[in-house]
Amino acid sequence: MLLLKVFARGNIKILNKILGRYTSKEFDVAIKYLGDKYGLADVMSCNVYTNIVLFSLIILILFLVISLEIFKNPFHAVPISIMISLISYMVMYYSIIGEYERDKFILSTYYCLMFKEITLAYDSTKSILESIRFVASGNYPIISIIFEKIVQNIINGLEPEHVLTSIPYESICLRLKKIFSWIKLKSTRDFLLEKEELNGYEKLLPKIEAYCLILISFGAFMPIIYSFIMIYMKMVIPIMILELALLQIVFLTFLSRLISSNLSIVIGEKNEKEQ
Amino acid sequence: MKKSNKMIFYTFTICIIIAFVIIYNKIGDQTFITLVSLLLMLFSYSFLHKKANKKIRIPLSYYLNENLELEKFLTLFVNNLKLNQSPELSLLCLCKEYDDEKVNLTIIQNTILGLPAYKTLMNLCNFFSSNYSKRILTLFSRSLKYNTKYFVEKAHEILTHLKENIKVQREIEGLMFRIRVRVTLISITSSAILSFFSKILPFIYFILNGKSSFTTNSLEYNALTFFVNLSFLILAFFNTYTISSIMFHSHAFVLSICSALVFILTHLILPEIKVSV
C-alpha cells in the first residue's frame, strides 16, 4: 500500500506518455484493483510505472557512483549497479502485481465455497441482495469485503446489475454474472461433494509446494555449487561471487514469475472445470 | 500495530542496537549479546502487537456448545413447523422443550408484542456470539419471511450444506497453513545452510589451493570472506522473499528479514576458523 501511495504521486506527462505504452495489461489491472482497494481512485498505471522506472534509474546512478568509488573498476561497477537497479525494479514492479495475484488466488480458493453459499442463500430467500449479504457476512478473506461494498452500493440506490458490471474485480465480476445467469435460468447445479472439492485442493497445493522446493534448492544450492566450481577451477575473484549472486537473484525472480503464472493457469483450469 | 506502538517499537529497537554496540565494546561476547538483543526485540514486538490487537476470544468448547445448541433449537423449531403449526406457535411450543431461559423469555416477550416469527429469530441473534450462528439465524429468518412451507422443506438441507461448507473452509485453511509453514521453515533452514557454507568456503579455498603461507587475517582471505558473506546474505534474504511471494504470504518482507537474521545468527554461533601457517 505504501509503495503504491508513494509511486502514485508525481506526474511527468511526457514520460508517462512514452513509458505508458510499455505497461503490461496485468499491471494495468493490478493498479486499477489496488487503487480501488486502498481508496486511491485517481491512480494511473502509467504514472506508477514511470515512477518505478525513474526510481530504478536513480538507484542505478547512485550505485554506479558508489561502486566506481569502491571498486575503481568499471568492469565490476557497471554490471553490479545494473543488476542492483534491475532487482529493485523487479521487486517494486512484481510486488504490486504480486499483491493483486495474492488476492486473486484467495478469490479462486474460496470461489467454490462462495458459489455454494450464494446459491444456497438465493435458493432459500430468492433475493440477490440477501444472497450477496449472506456471503458478505461469511468472514471470507477479501471476498466478504468486496461483497460488503456491493451491498453498500445496492443499498445506496444503485441497481445490482450496474454494481456488478462496474466493480473492478474482473474475475469476480465475471463469475458473479455467471452465477446469476445460472440462477435466472434455473439451471440448478448439483453441489460438489466436499470430498471431491478437498481432493482438488489436496492435488493442487502439493504442486505449489513442489515448485517452492525447486526454487529453494535453486536458491540455496546454486551459490554453493558455483562457489565450489570456482574454487576447484582456481578462478576465485571475490567480487565475481557477488556478481553471480545478483545474477542468480534476477534469474530467481524470473523463475518465480514463471511458476506463479503457471499456478494461475492451474487454479484457473480448476475453476473452469468446476464451472 | 497502531502508529504509537510502532514508534515505541522502533525507539526500543534503536535503544537495543545502541546498547548492543556499547556492551559489545566493553565485553566483546558477540553471540551472547546478539541472542539477548534479538530475544528482547521479538519479545517487545509480540508484546506490543498483542496489546494493539486485543480481541475477545471465544473458547473453542463454548463455540462448539453454542453450535450444538443452535442446531438443537433449529431442529425443534422445524419439527414443530412440520406439524403444520404457524411459525409463532412453533416458537412458543419450542419454549417447553428448550432449556435456555433467556431465549425462551425473548420468544415469549416478542410473541406477546406481536412480532412475526422471522423478527424474533433476528432478535435471537444477540444471544449467540459466533458469526456462524448469527449468519444461520439471519438466513433462516429471511427464508422464513419468504416462504414458510419452502423453508420447512429446505431447512435441514441448508443446515447440512452450511456445516459442510464450514468444514471444507477449515480444511482448506489448514492445508494452506501447513504447506506455508513447511515451505517457510525449509526456506529459513536453507539460509542457515548458506550461512554455514559462507563460513567454511574461504577456508576450503585456501586449503584446496594449497597456499603455503596464509593466515585468516590476510587481505585476500578477508576480501573473500566479506564478499561470500555479503552475497550469501543477500541470497538468503531474496530466497525467502521469492518463496513467500509464491506462497502468497502477506508478510513476505518480515519473513525475509527473519531469514536474514537466522543467517547472521548462525554465522555468529558457528566457531571462528583461525589458522595461521
Image: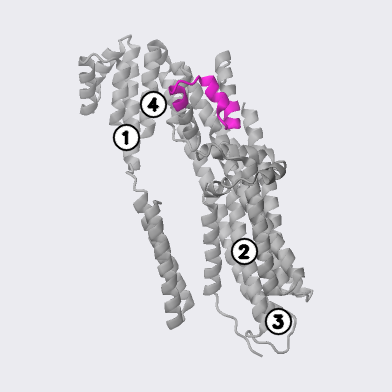
The amino acid sitting under disc 2 is Ile
Give the residue pinned by disc 4: B136
Q: Which residue corresponds to the image point at 24% horizontal and 21% vertical from the top-left? A: B107
The answer to which of B108 and B68 lies nearer the viewer is B108
Disc 3 residue type (three-letter): Ile
- Counting other residues with Cα less than 10 Å from the Cα at mark 2, is it few (<14), some (14-19), or many (20 or more)? some
Q: Which residue is mark 1?
A: B129
Badge 4 amino acid: Ile
Q: Kindly state the secondary structure of the residue where label 3 is placed.
A: helix
Residue B160 place in picture, x, y as percent: 44, 26
In the rendered view, how is the structure colored?
one colour
Measure the alpha-carbon separation of dots 1 and 3.
68 Å
The residue labelled by disc 2 is B234
Which chain letter goes with mark 1?
B
The answer to whether dots 1 and 3 both sit on one chain is: yes
What range is drawn magenta here?
A: A151-175
Task: Give the chain letter at badge 2.
Answer: B
Marks 4/2: CA–CA distance: 51 Å
Quarter holding the C terminus of chain B is bottom right
A11 up-or-down from A197: above or below: below
Numbered tag placed on residue B169 in the rendering: none
Residue B213 colored in magenta in the image: no
Q: Secondary structure at mark 1?
A: loop
Which element carries disc 2, helix, strand or loop?
Answer: helix
Q: Are marks 1 and 2 on the same chain?
A: yes
